[in-house]
Image (tube, helix red, strand yellow):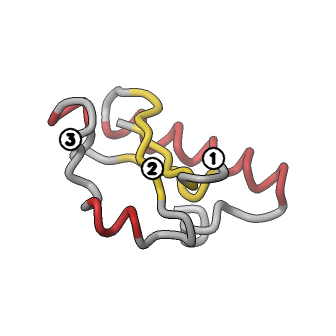
């Protein structure tokens, strides 16, 4: 599935990613990609995991790259927790 991490307080995007250990596999609110502690420590206000869409690993990877390129084109950089857009 494709997911995004957003700041709990502001709702601003912190990361866009894809995983096979998301809510589509384990159920709503039960993703295994990040622990609650990791999410709480990701930014000043903590991060919230949000499922964006589901599909094959390859299709989610390709979609994620397109989304990151659009973000970079709009804001001049990738979301703060994405390393070089990957």
Give the vertical position of 55 relative to 42 (above or below): above
Q: Which labelled disc corresponds to residue 55?
A: none
Q: Looking at the rendering, which quadrant does residue 76 occupy?
A: bottom right
Q: Which labelled disc corresponds to residue 48?
A: 2
Task: Name the residue furthest left.
Answer: 26
The answer to which of marks 2 and 1 sits earlier in the sequence is 1
Residue drawn at the location 37% of the way across and 39% of the way down: 58
Q: Looking at the rendering, which quadrant does residue 40 occupy?
A: bottom left
Mark 1 nearby-residue class (10 Å; few <14, some 14–19, many ≥20): few
Q: Secondary structure at mark 3?
A: loop
The percent coordinates of residue 39 (x first, y second) are 38, 62
The answer to which of marks 1 and 3 sits earlier in the sequence is 1
Q: CA distance from mark 1 to mark 3?
A: 20 Å
The percent coordinates of residue 29 (x first, y second) are 27, 37
Nearest the viewer among 13 and 74 is 13
Q: CA distance from mark 2 to mark 3?
A: 12 Å
Q: Which residue is mark 3?
A: 30
**Side of 6 where 41 appears, left or right:** left
Give the vertical position of 65 relative to 37 (above or below): above
């Amino acid at each position: 599935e494709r997911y995004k991490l957003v700041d709990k307080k502001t709702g601003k995007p912190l990361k866009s990613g894809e995983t096979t250990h998301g809510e589509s596999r384990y159920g709503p609110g039960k993703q295994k990609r990040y622990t609650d502690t990791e999410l709480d420590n990701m930014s000043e206000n903590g991060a919230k995991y949000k499922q964006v869409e589901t599909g094959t690993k390859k299709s989610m990877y390709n979609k994620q790259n397109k989304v990151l390129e659009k973000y970079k084109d709009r804001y001049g950089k990738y979301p703060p927790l994405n390393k070089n857009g990957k």
